[in-house]
Image (tube, coloured by chain):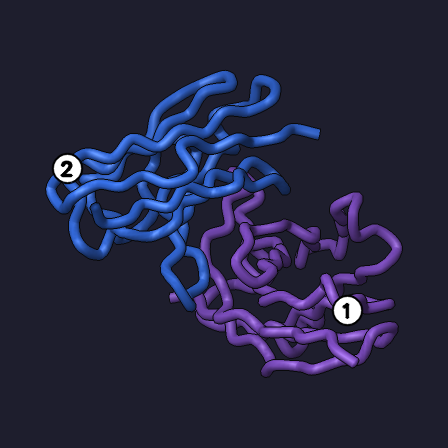
Amino acid sequence: QAQLVQSGAEVKQPGASVQVSCQASGYTFSNYGLVWVRQAPGQGLECMGWISVFNGNTNYARKFQGRVTLTTDTSTRSGYMELRSLRSDDTAVYYCALMTTVTTSFDHWGQGTLVTVSS
Amino acid sequence: EIELTQSPGTLSLSPGERATLSCRASQSVSSRFLAWYQQKPGQAPRLLMYSTSIRATGIPDRFSGSGSGTDFTLTISRLEPEDFAVYYCQQYGTFGGGTKVEIK
């Protein structure tokens, strides 16, 4: 059974950067893409972008282009999301999920990582 | 960029009743890429349906999906207590705004 375990909560100051990690187990790592989705308090789901574990290709949502970087490390079966120039409205729970490329559905999700941006 | 509009925003129903949730796309989308998720408070979303009408592993058959083009529907035939949650449709990198199914 696929499982994704994310790193712990973070508190950052405005203007800083944050990196969230996502450790995968229970499946062939390169068979899926990794997508990152965030959810601000009381709000809906917002897709930030995804990365192909197979070839490293990325696709970023227009809103986040230039401010987010997605990477993977196949040796540790991990994915990483770095968000720079943090603002207070970046306060949210950040999720990683496995994306099935054939249907682009997000099949398995991490538990979420709360990132709080506050001075 | 495609937008997904879900309606209603909130659905107030009693256990045992039928729930019908709508997801409308701003332009025609392939049914292959339309999925539905359930999210309960404090939990990560869970995949319910993919490719419009295929139930994900472990999803009970009271959940069904249908639609094509710009109009898609998630139906819960008889609401169980554990079904009261927020539901999202998704196509590629776009989510709908969600429908909250609450206990009447």
**Circle 2 sits in a helix, a strand or a loop, which is it?**
loop
Give the image quarter of residue A95.
bottom right
Residue at the (77%, 69%) spot, across then down: A82
**Chain of residue at mark 1:** A
Marks 1 and 2, how far apart in space?
44 Å
The chain coloured purple carries which letter?
Answer: A
Chain for colour blue: B
Amino acid type of the residue that numbered disc 2 sits on in the rendered structure: Glu
Residue A73 at x, y = what percent? 71, 72
Residue A34 visible, this orientation: no
Q: Quadrant of the N terminus of chain B?
A: top right
Density class for disc 2 (Cα within 10 Å; few <14, some 14-19, many ≥20) is: few
Q: Position of residue A54 (x, y in %)?
A: 67, 55
User: Residue at 27% of width from left, 51% of height from top?
Assistant: B84
Amino acid type of the residue that numbered disc 1 sits on in the rendered structure: Glu
Question: Looking at the rendering, which quadrant does residue B4 occupy?
Answer: top right
| Residue in the foreground of this view, choosing between B10 and B3 | B10
Instruction: Give me the disc on residue B17.
Output: 2
Please name the residue that numbered disc 1 is placed on.
A82
